[in-house]
Amino acid sequence: MISLKINQKQYDVDVNPDMPLLWVLRDVLQMPGTKYGCGVASCGACTVHLNGDAVRSCVTKISRAANQEVVTIEGLSPNGDHPLQKAWLEADVPQCGYCQSGQIMSAAVLLREKPDPTDQDIDDAMNGNLCRCGTYLLIRKAIHLAADMQKQGAKI
């Protein structure tokens, strides 16, 4: 049995310690917001937070997440009212939407570390999060919008 704390809730799962966190989230715990993209940590679709750091859950063994703080897109804001989620909609970022949860989870770490990011900060932080629809300029715009919301008192 492996004990996990995901989105501030405790879970005990009986899985192989080498199983990727992604598959525990999606298949065992039925949290489908974290997406499978490539399986080799190259695309960022599976990004979640582990103790506040953005990690690729497709290559993070569940044993590494044991007794650690895990946050998924479902836990970022249960009501979908996180400033990044609002900004994503305001900037009309989603196209197919497949990469969006990973993009948002990476952006959340960026805004926590750099509340007023430059275009270069955003490009550097989001490098490696692939969007097949090519919405990179809209993603950058949404991150700036969320940073502005944060300056006005919205909680990131």
Image (cartoon, helix red, strand yellow):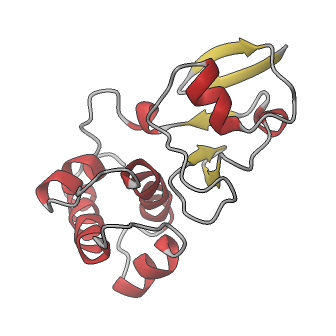
Residue 85 vs residue 23: left or right? left
Residue 115 vs residue 7: left or right? left
Residue at 47% in and 30% down = 32
Query: In the image, is residue 80 above or below residue 107?
Result: above
Rendering coords of residue 80 (x, y %): 27, 35
Residue at 66% in and 44% down = 50
Quarter of the image that includes the N terminus: top right
Residue 30 vs residue 156: left or right? right
Residue 155 vs residue 43: left or right? left
Rendering coords of residue 153 (x, y %): 23, 51
Of 154 and 131, nearer the camera is 131
Rendering coords of residue 49 (x, y %): 58, 46
Indicate the quadrant where residue 120 lies: bottom left
Residue occupying the far bottom of the picture: 120
Of 136 and 78, nearer the camera is 136
Indicate the quadrant where residue 69 lies: top right
Query: In the image, is residue 25 above or below residue 91?
Result: above
